[in-house]
Amino acid sequence: MKLTKLLPFSLTGLCLVALNLPAAGQPGAAVGGASAGLLAQPAPPQSTAGLARQINDLLQITKAKSAAGHTSEGDLATEMKQIESLLQAHAGEKSEDVAHLAYLQAEIYANFFGQREKATILLNQVIATYPNTVAARNAATYLPQVGKIATDALTRLTDALIQDMATKGYNGHESEQDMAPELKQLANLLAEHKGDRSDEVARVALVQAQTYAKYLGQRDKALSLLDQMMASYPGTSAAQRARDYLPKAAGEAADAATRNSLIPGKSFPDFATADISGLALSVAKFKGKVVLLDFWATWCEPCLAELPTTQKLYAQFHKDGFEIIGISLDTAEGKPSLPAFLAARNMTWPEFCDGREWQNQLARKYGVWEIPSTILIDQNGKIIGRQFHGEALTQAVSQAMAALARKPRGG
């Protein structure tokens, strides 16, 4: 999807103001690029049936989880525990089977967890413990590559976390509880790579700091983590990006805090302005009705993809007390053509646009940094929820209208 204006990329089918997140690396092959590794090979033919079968089962499971994108240490905890148990059970054996299993353990630490130092230690143990085995020869061949392979794996893990958090943010799940799995994984990655001062690890620390600002709205925590990150990883490109990000961190934290204050059941903090026709505009103007605030722009392709849903809902429920207030983030240059755009698409609901794009008065008031964004408000001015899209929006509006039909307005 090609986006224009200030939107350098699209993560989850939405338009984003420049996030300043560390640039995502190119995802690698599912098994981390080690073409000669065990993950791309069956067990040696000379293996005994029992252990060989268990190894092949582990290979199939790890391949399946890799294909599904489940490659964190938590995702593979069961398999790693099984490998460790098997190695303990076969301690003292020098067979190809056990060597094969030890090599698989090392390869997973490199390919999936991005733990270069751990993988290097385990590979050296394979070479020392199981000399003259195929696994030992493979380990010796693999060692020179382990740094790059582990680095690529760490990049993929970080990219996946950025994607997961962007998706949660898009769906309005930005609390610390919502982000707990990602925060835990970021902390684990940093702990696993303690002492590693590479740019890849620095990037993990930067993402951690930005998460506290962009999603959780915790300004002081974010600034503290940024300071720690710059001190711990001097000379990295991620540290330079952190310095560039510092002046913006407080503003983004304030936006996130605002968004996170818009919780269901709370009275909506209203605005008073004028629509593009010069008429007074506020949510209070529509007291007794269900109101959808729809932040969008004519240049935002994901917003236009959502338009059939809002048009259908308006046609179905407007007569029963459903209202939409459009909040367009179009530019000053685009604002004059907005009325014609609306008329051509039968968008007859009130529209606000001040031509300031991401500095739009109402976007700033409600901490909006992505579009399409929505806030749904009931007939009494209470927040129903935010970030409803597609089928979720249809369900939320339908439920709100059913509740409106059951209750006296204003009650």
Image: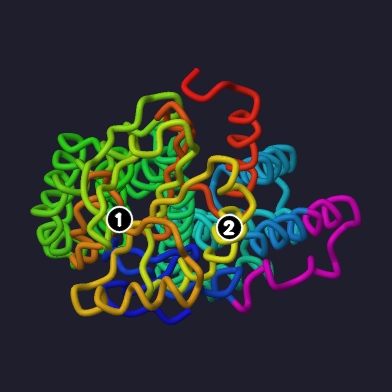
**Foreground pick, 373 / 321:** 321
Badge 1 is on which residue?
369
Residue 386's disc is: none
Between the C-alphas of marks 2 and 1, the distance is 38 Å
**Foreground pick, 76 / 292:** 292
> In percent of the image, x 31 and y 72: which residue is there?
7
**Foreground pick, 15 / 142:** 15
Q: As shown in the figure, which amino acid type bears the numbered disc 1?
A: Trp
Q: Which residues are magenta?
A: 35-57
User: Can you give x and y, in whole percent of width and height, for residue 266 in the image?
Assistant: 38, 25
Please tell me which of labels 2 and 1 falls first in the chain. 2
User: Can you give x and y, in whole percent of width and height, for residue 89 in the image?
Assistant: 74, 38
Residue contact at pointers 2 and 1, CB within 8 angstroms: no
User: Can you give x and y, in whole percent of width and height, for residue 38 in the image?
Assistant: 67, 68
Q: Within the magenta stretch, is there residue 86?
A: no
Q: As shown in the figure, which amino acid type bears the numbered disc 2?
A: Ile
Say if residue 123 shows up in the picture: yes
Circle 2 packing at 10 Å, graded few (<14), some (14-19), many (20+), is: many
Residue 108's disc is: 2
Applied colour scheme: rainbow
Q: State left or right for residue 369 relative to residue 118.
A: left
